Image: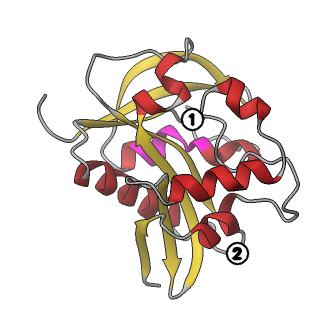
Amino acid sequence: MGIEVRPATSFEDVKTMVGPKRPDANVCWCLSYRIPSKQNQALRGTERGELVKQLVAQDPPPGVLAYDGGEVVGWAAVHPRADTSFAGNRKIPHVDGADVWSIWCIRVRPGYRGKGISHQLLAGAVDMARTYGAPAVEGYPVDNGGRKMDLTMAYVGTRKLFEDAGFTKAADTNSVLNGFPRVLMRLELQPH
């Protein structure tokens, strides 16, 4: 299977991966960490999709998409941490003052799971951050020790997924998801 990962510049494909089935539904749209929480709570229904449409048109776009042929099969959110709600998140520490990028959501469409696409999405997100000159990339996955977790919570990734991509644990966090502690995983891309 030839999976290709590229920057998320197609609003329709981002919508397929993170948008609601009904345009007026209040779903995350992968905005809850990307924008300040007051703004996130204020946006309703179609306003969320409209904001994503604007983000997709920006440089850098809000993440990467995975394609199997012409079919979109996965999404990963990646952006400079300073422009996300992780910038001020008290539960997730700052390791240092480097202008790191954050990867906070990895989703693979049902029917395509278990084929390693999340690994390719993570690699693609790292490549995009590297292209934009990020000194390092962070993720905040759960440390589930290989135990089963609720699929709706699996979007943050697992420690093993990030370790397999060369990330190392840089810090503990005070964040817990689905009963599992989240850890700060980091990959240095260039000396700072």
Crowd tier of the residue under label 1, counting other residues whose Cα lies within 10 Å: few below 14, some 14–19, many 20 or above: few
User: Which is nearer the N-term, disc 1 or disc 2?
Assistant: 2
Left-right relation of 159 to 185: right
| Secondary structure category for the residue under label 2 | loop
In percent of width and height, residue 4 lies at 41, 76
Residue 16 quadrant: bottom right
Quarter of the figure with the C terminus = top left
In percent of width and height, residue 65 lies at 50, 66
Name the foreground residue: 146 vs 167. Answer: 167
Please state the total of marks drawn on the protein image. Answer: 2
Q: Is residue 167 magenta?
A: no
Q: Residue at x 49, y 51 (%)?
A: 62
* Residue on which the image places disc 2: 111
Q: Label 1 vs label 2: CA separation? A: 25 Å
Name the foreground residue: 79 vs 168. Answer: 79
Name the foreground residue: 138 vs 142. Answer: 138
Which span is picked out in magenta?
A: 156-162
Q: Give, as a three-letter code, the residue at label 1.
A: Gly
| Secondary structure category for the residue under label 1 | loop
Q: Residue at x 83, y 42 (%)?
A: 44
Left-right relation of 32 to 88: right
Q: Give, as a three-letter code, the residue at label 2.
A: Gly
**Numbered mark located on residue 145 in the image:** 1
